[in-house]
Amino acid sequence: MSYYIRSMRKEDIPQVSRIDREAFPTMLPPPNFERELRNQMTHFYVVCDEDKQVDQVYIPVARTKTTGLIHRLKKWFNPDGAITDDTFQAENYNDYICGYVGFWVMADEAHITTIAVSEELQRRGIGELLLLTVFNRARELYANVVTLEVRVSNIGAQNLYLKYGFKQVGVRRAYYTDNREDAYIMTSADITSSECRSQIKELYQAHISRWGEARFSFSIN
């Protein structure tokens, strides 16, 4: 596969929403990605498979005023971009989204709010590309550390984060609203330090050796 990483766009919302529902089926309400993309504090990136294309994509129509129970229920139960009177077909768009990540930066901290990969494409290095993206972009946004929460039962994700130098620094009790599961708080090393940058560079080279070189819409350093 040939991967391309870029900033998330409005046209990506239906595919990202489907991946989100796969990864977090019990978390309600679903994210409002259109609002997130307008938030200057948040940063979203997607991994695209350049060897695949989607046939057609329908994206939400921006509304200047949202009122009424029926309208709210439609937005609640239509998170994956099904065709309704609130959608329109995207023109000249066929990118195939494999995964996405979202984070915000405040002061010297970059906090990963969400990260997910399509079920059928897991264990193919896509999650690592998303982490590499966060490390790189967070440094450019003057962050010193990256933080996140992860379910205590999600051993696979924890192992990936440990591989990239994260350490468990605390627990948030009953953090997840669907089943009141605890979350581990994990924090990276100082991402601006020479030691951390060398480690990330080595991991990136190892990723290239195994999965091939991906293209980024921004410089990787």
Image (spheres, rainbow, N blue to C red):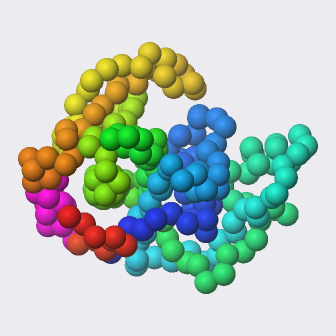
Q: Residue at x 47, y 56 (%)?
A: 44
Instruction: Residue at 37% x, 36% y: name it.
Output: 148
Number of dots carrying numbers: 0
164 left or right of 17 in image: left
Q: Quadrant of residue 14?
A: bottom right
Q: Quadrant of the N terminus?
A: bottom left
Is 111 rendered above or below residue 75? above
Q: Quadrant of the C terminus?
A: bottom left
Q: Does 56 sit above or below residue 85? A: below
* Horizontal arrangement in the rendering, residue 194 relative to residue 144 (left or right): left
Residue 61 location in percent, x, y?
76, 64
Vertical placement of residue 10 versus 94, above or below: above
Residue found at the far top of this picture = 173
Q: Is residue 205 magenta?
A: yes
Q: Position of residue 20 (x, y in %)?
A: 54, 48
Q: Quadrant of residue 11?
A: bottom right
The magenta stretch is: 200-212
Residue 20 in view: yes
Q: Main secondary structure of the magenta part?
A: helix
Q: Is residue 42 left or right of residue 196?
A: right
Quarter-of-image position of residue 50: bottom left
Q: Nearer the viewer, residue 178 or 137?
A: 137
Does the image show residue 18? Answer: no
Q: Where is residue 120 drawn, in percent x and y?
A: 43, 57
Q: Residue at x 85, y 63 (%)?
A: 85
For the residue pair 104 and 30, the one nearer the viewer reads as: 104
**Is 144 included in the stretch rendered in magenta?**
no
Residue reaching furthest to the bottom: 92
Residue at 8% over, 47% down: 195
